[in-house]
Amino acid sequence: MIKKITGVLTGVILLSYGCYNDKEEILYGITTCDGTNASFSVNVSPIIQSNCAITDCHAAGSINGPGALTSYLQIKNAAVQIKSAVVSRFMPQTGSLSSSQIKSISCWVDAGAPNN
């Protein structure tokens, strides 16, 4: 009986701990967008154009992942995928974005990916 109770309690503790560590803010250190530049034309587009919309990645005609990322509409349509890929540091494959660049993209997506 004690083994069963111990097993159940261990499972509950592990499950609770696993859910706690599923929070993006804890995993990636993104806590707030206050004071973050999240302008598409000034911040996000230059990051995407220089790191993603390049040959063999997401240039015109690309079929990789969400496809080409050369226009606002293409980037907006893939915004959630882009955020996930850069926050997890899975992308870009050519290197790593700075924390500031990742935060700009993340905050822009969280703001509804406006064309600003």
Image: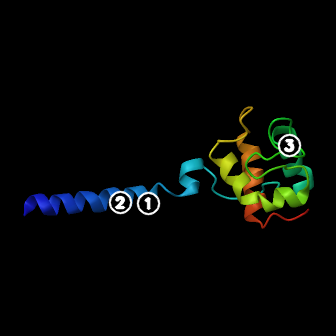
- Residue plotted at (37% across, 61% down): 16
Asked if the residue at tag 2 contacts the one at tag 1, i.e. Cβ–Cβ closer than 8 Å, the answer is: yes
Q: Secondary structure at mark 2?
A: helix
What mark, if any, has residue 15 been given in the picture? 2
Q: How many marks?
A: 3
**Location of residue 88 in the rendering, given as x and y in whole percent from the top left corner:** 62, 46
Q: Is residue 58 above or below residue 84?
A: above
Q: Where does the C terminus fall, quadrant-wise?
A: bottom right
What's the residue type where badge 2 is placed?
Leu
Q: Nearer the viewer, mark 3 or mark 1?
A: 3
Q: Is residue 94 above or below residue 40?
A: above
Asked if the residue at tag 1 contacts the one at tag 3, i.e. Cβ–Cβ closer than 8 Å, the answer is: no
Q: Is residue 69 left or right of residue 5?
A: right
- Residue plotted at (50% across, 56% down): 22
**Location of residue 70 in the rendering, given as x and y in whole percent from the top left corner:** 90, 49
User: Could one spot residue 68 in this view of the protein?
Assistant: yes
What mark, if any, has residue 19 been given in the picture? 1
